[in-house]
């Protein structure tokens, strides 16, 4: 594998990501931003194990996570506890560029939307991985999931770069090893547990953005 050996706290652990997504939803099905970004942080550890070819993707995701963490830790932090409270606060205070980019080009709503779209890619990719066979190619699964989701929001140059990165993804067996779960059967079982959680978080976010006409924020 292309990446260097990660230290213990940089090591990816699917169970950890699963636990984080379990914490995302409140009893009233609001999405806690803190756990949502923690879930992404866990996933980025995986990306970092794959080598520097994925650096440009990891950098963009880290940057977006940091924007949200800054809001969470900032003076208006209490408004950013859940996605629902963030949306309400930013909309009520005209803090979102709704039609064209202006003075709020790094709003929480816009930033989260980019990660939300990536969550759909993840859902589609993990479902393919879960139902894959030994000879399935991770690059094909990743590419198909990307074309059905994120690619529709990316310009040609990003799509090209992403396509090139997918070509150097490790094979299914090596990929499963990086997941740090156990046998392929155990990986498949854990994916089966993780997917409904990821799907539910995705659906709730999608509904929230649809309700406020924010699925196309510039
Ligand atoms: C369970 C273990 C197996 C799967 C582990 C997957 C780990 C994936 C971790 C992170 C995924 C990356 C998230 C990328 C967020 C991209 C957000 C985005 O769309 N940004 C673009 C738009 O932003 P603005 O310009 O409007 O601010 C930005 O232009 C993008 C730049 C970078 C390229 C993004 C390519 C995304 C490809 C996603 C597939 C990742 C491949 C991972 C392979 C396992």
Image (cartoon, helix red, strand yellow):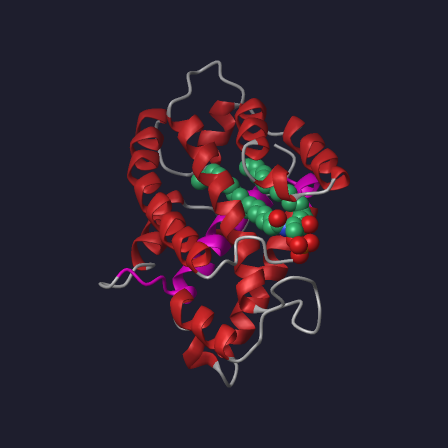
Tally the numbered discs: 0
On whether residue 40 falls in the magenta region, the answer is yes
Measuring from the top left, give residue 64's x and y in whole percent.
59, 60
Q: Quadrant of residue 36?
A: bottom left
Q: Residue at x 46, y 77 (%)?
A: 89
Measuring from the top left, give residue 141's x and y in whole percent.
52, 25
| Predominant SS along the magenta part | helix
Q: Between residues 54 and 156, which one lies in front from this camera angle?
A: 156
Q: Is residue 144 left or right of residue 20?
A: right
Quadrant where the C terminus lies?
bottom right
User: Splitting the image into four quadrants, where does ligand 1 fall?
Assistant: top right
Measuring from the top left, give residue 113's x and y in whole percent.
53, 56
Q: Is residue 182 left or right of residue 175?
A: left
Q: Residue at x 50, y 58 (%)?
A: 213
Q: Is residue 124 visible?
A: yes
Q: Residue at x 38, y 28 (%)?
A: 130
Residue reaching furthest to the bottom: 75
Quadrant where the N terminus lies?
top right
Measuring from the top left, give residue 43's x and y in whole percent.
49, 48
Q: Between residues 115 and 85, which one lies in front from this camera angle?
A: 85
Q: Is residue 50 visible?
A: no
Q: Is residue 23 left or right of residue 208?
A: left
The stretch of residues the image draws in magenta is 29-55
* Residue 103 vertical placement versus 193 (above, below): below
């Amino acid at each position: 594998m292309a990446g260097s050996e990660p230290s213990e706290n940089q090591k990816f652990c699917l169970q950890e990501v699963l636990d984080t997504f379990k914490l995302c939803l409140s009893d009233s099905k609001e999405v806690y931003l803190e756990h949502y970004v923690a879930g992404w942080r866990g996933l980025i550890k995986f990306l970092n194990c794959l080598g520097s070819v994925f650096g440009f993707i990891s950098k963009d995701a880290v940057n977006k996570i940091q924007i949200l963490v800054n809001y969470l830790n900032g003076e208006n932090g209490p408004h950013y506890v859940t996605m629902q409270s963030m949306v309400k606060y930013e909309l009520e205070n005209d803090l979102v560029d709704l039609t064209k980019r202006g003075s709020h080009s790094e709003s929480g709503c816009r930033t989260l939307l980019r990660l939300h779209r990536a969550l759909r890619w993840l859902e589609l990719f993990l479902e393919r991985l879960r139902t894959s066979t030994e000879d399935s190619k991770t690059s094909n699964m990743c590419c198909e999931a990307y074309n059905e989701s994120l690619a529709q929001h990316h310009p040609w140059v990003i799509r090209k770069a992403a396509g090139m990165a997918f070509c150097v993804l490790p094979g299914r067996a090596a990929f499963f090893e990086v997941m740090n779960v156990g046998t392929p059967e155990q990986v498949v079982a854990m994916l089966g547990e993780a997917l409904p959680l990821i799907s539910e978080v995705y659906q709730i976010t999608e509904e929230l953005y649809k309700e406020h006409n924010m699925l196309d924020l510039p």
